[in-house]
């Protein structure tokens, strides 16, 4: 979950969403505990590094892309897809409703991924804990923005 492109603090994973998004985002009512933009590239670099190494550990322990890897790596892939879908929903489409649904489903998939990976490689599951903590904050932030900006819910 990255601030709009063109704004300080965007990481390499951010997706171009148009020129009006920075203005739209700035106009949203946000809580005082919203992280500063410069935290996002640092946080996501660390999180994706941990996630990538964790996925390698699981993939390696399962012997690659065999039938045993379908569920654990499928859960991982599904949560990545939801993670990558959030910025276009929030910043691109300005759809707070769908962004909220996305992040709530993402939370469930990350927990499912961790549970699946715990049986395979406990370190890999533990490496997802910082990601889950960041998502908890991002979920609370999304809920708060959703609640505090009712005029934006149908955009």
Image (spheres, helix red, strand yellow):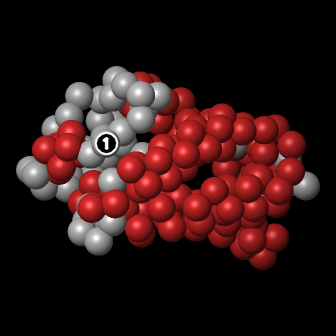
Quarter assignment of residue 88? bottom left
**In front here: 57 or 129?**
129
**In front here: 144 or 110?**
144
Secondary-structure class at tag 1: loop
Residue 98 visible from this viewpoint: yes
Quarter assignment of residue 136? top right
Residue 15: give x, y in percent of width and height.
27, 52
Residue 110: give x, y in percent of width and height.
67, 56
Residue at the limit of the structure toward the bottom, as seen here? 67
Picture layout, residue 36 above or below residue 138: above
| Residue at the image position 86 percent from the left and 51 percent from the top | 118
Quarter the C terminus occupies: bottom left
| Residue at the image position 39 percent from the left and 50 percent from the top | 148
Crowd rating for badge 1 (residues with CA inside 10 Å; few <14, some 14–19, many 20+): few
Label 1 sits on residue: 29
Residue at the limit of the structure toward the right, as seen here? 119
Residue 97: give x, y in percent of width and height.
41, 67
């Amino acid at each position: 979950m990255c601030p709009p492109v063109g704004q300080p603090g965007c990481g390499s994973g951010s997706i171009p969403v148009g020129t009006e998004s920075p203005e739209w985002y700035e106009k949203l009512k946000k809580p005082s505990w919203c992280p500063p933009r410069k935290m996002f590239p640092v946080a996501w670099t660390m999180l994706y590094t941990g996630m990538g190494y964790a996925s390698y550990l699981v993939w390696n322990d399962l012997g690659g892309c065999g039938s045993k890897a379908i569920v654990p790596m499928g859960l991982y892939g599904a949560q990545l897809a939801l993670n990558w879908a959030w910025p276009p929903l929030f910043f691109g489409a300005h759809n707070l409703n769908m962004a909220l649904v996305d992040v709530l489903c993402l939370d469930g998939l990350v927990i499912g991924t961790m549970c699946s990976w715990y049986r395979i490689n406990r370190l890999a599951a533990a490496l997802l804990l910082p990601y889950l903590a960041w998502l908890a904050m991002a979920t609370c932030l999304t809920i708060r923005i959703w609640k505090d900006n009712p005029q934006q819910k149908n955009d």
